[in-house]
Amino acid sequence: MYRIKKTLPLAFLIILFHLPAFAQLIQPPKWQMSLSEETPFVGDEIELTFKATIPRDWYIYSNDFDPDLGPMLTELSLDGSQGIEAIGKLIPVDPSRKMDEIWEGEVSYFKGTAVFTQKIKITKPSVKIAASMGYQMCSDVTGQCVPFEEEFSKSLTAAIHTKDNQASASTSTTEEGQSGSLFTEKPNSSSTESEASPAQRSEEASVKVEETKIPEVSMEPEGKQGDATSLWPFVIAAFLGGMAALLTPCVFPMIPMTVTFFTGRSKSKAHGIRNAIIYGFSIIVIYTLAGTLVAAIQGPEFANWLSTHWLPNIFFFIVFIFFALAFLGLFEITLPSGLVNKMDAKADKGGLSGVFFMAFTLVLVSFSCTGPIVGSILIESAGGEILKPILGMFAFSLAFAIPFTLFAIFPEWLNTLPKSGGWLNSVKVVLGFLELALAFKFLSVADQVYHWGLLDRDIYIAIWIVIFGLMGLYLLGKIRLPHDSPMEKLGVPRLLMATVVFIFVIYMIPGLFGAPLKSLSGYLPPIASHDFNLEKMIRENSGGQASPASAMTEEPKYGDLLHFPHGLQGYFDYEQALRVAKAENKPLFIDFTGHGCVNCREMEAKVWAEPEVLSRLKNDFVLVALYVDERTELPESEWYTSTYDEKVKKTIGKQNADFQITRFNNNAQPYYVILDQNEKMLVQPKAYDTDPKKFVEFLDKAKDAYAQK
């Protein structure tokens, strides 16, 4: 028990991973278009309002951020309209904003409801509004992004007299295809036996083949990630924070004192157990109420402001530094003695209220040690969902209350506790180093959003190396701080902790030269801000590619526009890739992806970059990346009308998206399919899953199935 308690502070370094997600056809938002003036006059300027009701756990990107970041911006097209003239650009109404670490910049988005406005001028009496809204809907819960297009049509007759003349021509309006959803019904699954390529779909309109469906393979989601599951790392960290708080000099000596109080003043053992349970429950209630208060204060806009604006981030940075210096022994954080004395006096009255106020007294007396930890939890949860501060404080108080309750029920356990001593202050100092390291996360967010250039990735890593290096030296006794007791000899638990810390320091050193440090990606600035990337420099000096393009069977179509990551070579046109796969006698690996697909980039960084995955993709398959949001328009001879939504597909992305929907009954990315030369699926398709081992199994299973055929 002694060793376990001393190693608890290191639990803050635990990194948890996302769960996989896999979904079928995703339904789009419900849209409505309205006019600010239903009976306009020729020459009037009116406003079109487009309102979307977004499904739960999904969001759509706005259009007022840097288009070069990656996500697909919402765009409005009025091509085909008559009698109107667009004035200005499409304007989003009050979107939310956040600093996105994957895209390395600030993006804007809508949750729940999206509203856009477009000002137009009426130029003729006969008006036809033909609007097309292209956008991207994503979910952090399922790990998917889906591009959609919504079409609106409205006809009306505008008056030609002045507004003072009420005897103007009558106005009539008709609406066509209002909220004309792309997915009003599911595709017919009983298709013919023939296979349809993108070119053939211009005549056969996306034939769906029963043979391409895997029998007895469930297409239901394998698991979900996002709002619900993302709370668990935070809750676990809060619980471990409560356990760490028990080992501070302000709290640990209170355990035997409190237990003695209950056992000495209770009329019976049952009475003492009852009081102990009420005492522990009171601690939980006090801390959870604090979390509820924070949750009640913050709303969605306030949370967004907290997460992106420089002022709160700089404030939190200063608060964390303040907490760290207090833990390191520079000063003590204390509450007014009058408040503590009042609570203590009420605790002496006895009864249930006395037990509650005794718990309140413990909370106040231990504030100098628990305050920084509690403050850190509340700050970390300030920009999250409403449940986050409540669950965080509940988890912290649960860990904090359990030992007091258990030792009161089983007082004989007190004999197993280690004696108070200098090791308690050492725990406090270690927590101070952790607070100091975490403080720079807030400064980093402000630095990235406002492009100050103060805390690039390599500087950030260097700061962490120094902080954790000092922590390791402190654990070895090479550094002494105020309130530390002289250390005559180095204990084994302390040596093991120092060893783990130095291993972590050594792990970070390659990051100074451009190593990705994937397990710390959520804490570090984007790698694009790194001044010196040794890996990239070596690759560029050696030619820059894993294999020259000339070694490919054919020159990739659209190769001047699109590229594969990690030096991989492949194709961007399905027909060409299928032809090469047959020529090379290899299975065809289809990557349905998108420029604005954040989870596609995450898969490429965390999974494709692994050597066992990269080697298989490079050697065992012909790769084709089908971008569903590529807006390059094809020659008119390659256009076709899809029978699925009866819309003309003019661009590379729309044809690829239509192919994914009609062929595989799926419209979310990332989505990976492996086919044989007869265009039959070899294995069940794969979606977002950051476990490289599972991806290797997916590739190997497909390769074995291909070999058997």
Image: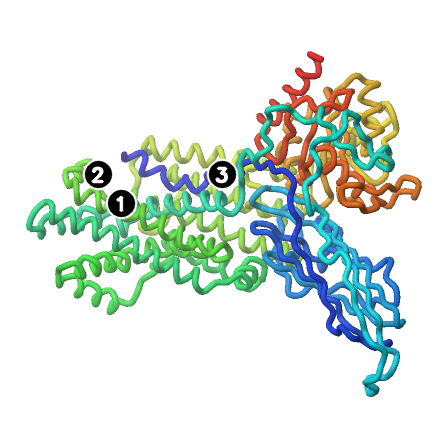
Q: Secondary structure at mark 3?
A: loop
Q: Position of residue 45 (x, y in %)?
A: 81, 74
Instruction: Quadrant for the N terminus, please.
Output: top left
Q: Amino acid at mark 2?
A: Leu
Q: Position of residue 412 (x, y in %)?
A: 14, 38
Q: Secondary structure at mark 2?
A: loop
Circle on res. 423: none
In the image, taking residue 584 as reference, residue 96 lies left or right, namely left
Tell me the residue that label 2 is attached to: 417
Label 1 or label 2, whichever lies nearer to me, is 1
Q: Amino acid at mark 3?
A: Ile
Which residue: 83% across, 44% down?
649
Q: Residues within 10 Å of mark 1 (few under 14, many from 20)?
A: some
- Gap between marks 3 and 2 measured at Cα: 30 Å
* Label 3 vs 1, first from the N-terminus: 3
- Gap between marks 3 and 1 measured at Cα: 25 Å
Q: Residues within 10 Å of mark 3 (few under 14, many from 20)?
A: few
Tell me the residue that label 1 is attached to: 402
Task: Using the image, determine if residue 160 lies above or below residue 704.
Answer: below
In the image, taking residue 11 as reference, residue 450 lies left or right, namely right
**Which one is nearer the viewer's eye here, 544 or 622?**
622
Which residue: 64% across, 36% down?
603
